[in-house]
Image (cartoon, rainbow, N blue to C red):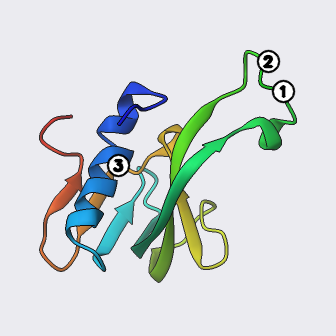
Amino acid sequence: MTYFHPEEKFQFGALSKYDDENPGTSYLIKYSDGESYICRYFTDYESENGGDLDIEMDDSRYDEFYQIAMDIVETIQAGSRRYQDGLTLDYRDWPVLIKDVDKGVVVYPGPTN
């Protein structure tokens, strides 16, 4: 798979592959400021920031990236990243830890980071 940004291979790619191999997994998603949730993988897709910033594709600020939408099952520490019962992950603000809570497997950061 070709990624828009090199870090997406070790972030988006690692989580997407793990979930393909372990569907229905519950993940601990934790950010450096302590915001954290237990989530399940909902879907993933390509996205861009044009609508966020009201910019066109030829603008130097335009960016394309992959996102993973997660369903929040439990809130451990609430924060500003949550949107209703969902959480969206992308390289611009990737969590510091993603862990399979059932198996204890750390999905990110992985051994290739």
Foreground disc of the pair 2, 3: 2
- Mark 2 — residue? 59
Q: CA distance from mark 2 to mark 3?
A: 30 Å
- Mark 3 — residue? 96
User: Quadrant of residue 51 in the image?
Assistant: top right
Q: CA distance from mark 3 to mark 1?
A: 31 Å
| Left or right: 69 as drawn, with respect to 84 | left
- Mark 1 — residue? 56
Say which amino acid is labelled 2.
Asp
Q: Are marks 1 and 2 in contact (CB under 8 Å)?
A: yes
Q: Position of residue 38 (x, y in %)?
A: 38, 76
Q: Secondary structure at mark 3?
A: loop
Residue found at x 41% / y 75%? 39
Q: Position of residue 104 (x, y in %)?
A: 13, 70
Q: CA distance from mark 1 to mark 2?
A: 6 Å
Say which amino acid is labelled 3.
Val
Out of 1 and 4, give the one closest to the viewer. Answer: 1
Residue found at x 39% / y 37%? 8
- Assess disc 1: are there few (<14), some (14-19) or many (≥20) residues with their C-alpha within 10 Å of its C-alpha: few
| First of labels 3, 1 by sequence position | 1
Q: Secondary structure at mark 2?
A: loop
Q: Position of residue 113 (x, y in %)?
A: 21, 34
> Which residue in the rendered view is the most extreme toward the right?
54
| Left or right: 25 as drawn, with respect to 71 | left
Residue found at x 42% / y 54%? 31
| Left or right: 68 as drawn, with respect to 56 | left
Say which amino acid is labelled 1.
Glu
Residue 2 visible to an observer of this rendering = yes
User: Quadrant of residue 59 in the image?
Assistant: top right
